[in-house]
């Protein structure tokens, strides 16, 4: 029983190993090195199988179903990967917008607090200046009265 290598490409027309691949093609042993076959097997776009050359199926309902199943599987995996990437991007963008909004609120709150503190300090300074002026006036009045008062004997 002679075996052949069947390579099924789930994306016909794509190029790998310098060859444009059809949906399926069978090769004689030795046409691909073991390293190349390992690379094909690692690529999700390809299905590599050893088959009896009399059992090679390259068309028909069973083959079409196998290719459709593989394509569907890869599309589903790609969709899930893209959905995860999209969800991550949306989440990251939302987190950044929220951080910016919080920073803006904090900055506004900080400047409002600073303004209120400055106003309060200004009011206290004015009250202190007024009291100091009143005390200085009273002190000057008392010194003037003391200067006019007869000296104690």
Image (tube, helix red, strand yellow):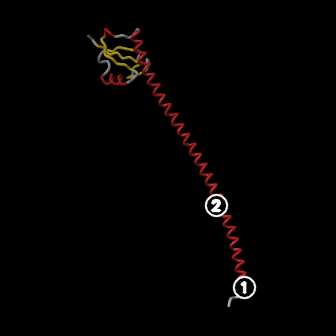
The structure residue drawn at horizontal position 65% and vertical position 59%, both measured from the top left corner, is: 120
Residue 139 pos. (x, y %): 69, 76
Q: How many marks?
A: 2
Q: Which mark is residue 149?
A: 1
Quadrant location of the C terminus in the rendered image: bottom right
- Residue 57 occupies which quadrant of the picture? top left
Mark 2 vs mark 1: in front: 1
Local crowd at mark 2 within 10 Å, few (<14), some, or many (≥20)? few
Residue neighbourhood size for the residue with mark 1, other residues' Cα within 10 Å, grouped as few (<14), some (14–19), many (≥20):
few
Q: Residue furthest left?
A: 1
**Residue 63 at x, y = what percent?**
39, 12
Name the residue at 70% across, 79% down.
Answer: 142
Where residue 127 sits: x, y (%)? 68, 65
Rendered-image quadrant of the N terminus: top left
Q: Residue furthest front?
A: 153
Q: Earlier in the sequence, mark 2 or mark 1?
A: 2
Q: Which is more toward the observer, 9 or 152? A: 152
Residue at numbered disc 2 = 121
Horizontally, residue 70 falls left or right of residue 138, namely left
The residue under the point 32% across, 16% down is 5
Residue 97 on image: x %, y %: 56, 39
Which residue is located at x 32 percent, y 9 percent?
Answer: 55
Q: Dividing the picture into quarters, in which one does residue 21 lie? A: top left
Question: Left or right of 152: which side holds 45?
Answer: left
Q: Mark 2 to mark 1: distance in Å?
A: 41 Å
Does dot 2 land on a helix, a strand or a loop?
Answer: helix
Q: Tell whether label 1 touches label 2 (CB within 8 Å).
A: no
Using the image as rendered, state which of residue 88 and residue 19 is in the foreground.
88
Observer-nearest of 119 and 46: 119
Q: Is residue 142 above or below residue 97?
A: below
The relative height of residue 86 versus residue 49 in the rendered view (above or below) is: below
């Amino acid at each position: 029983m002679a075996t052949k290598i069947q390579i099924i490409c789930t994306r016909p027309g794509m190029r790998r190993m310098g060859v444009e691949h059809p949906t399926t093609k069978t090769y004689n042993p030795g046409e691909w090195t073991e390293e190349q076959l390992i690379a094909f097997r690692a690529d999700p776009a390809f299905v590599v199988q050893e088959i009896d050359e009399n059992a090679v199926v390259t068309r028909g309902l069973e083959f079409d179903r196998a290719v459709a199943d593989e394509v569907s599987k890869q599309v589903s995996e790609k969709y899930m990967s893209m959905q995860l990437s999209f969800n991550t991007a949306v989440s990251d963008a939302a987190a950044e917008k929220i951080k910016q909004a919080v920073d803006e609120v904090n900055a506004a709150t900080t400047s409002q607090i600073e303004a209120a503190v400055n106003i309060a300090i200004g009011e206290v300074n004015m009250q202190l200046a007024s009291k100091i002026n009143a005390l200085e006036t009273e002190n000057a009045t008392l010194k003037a009265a003391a200067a006019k008062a007869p000296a104690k004997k």
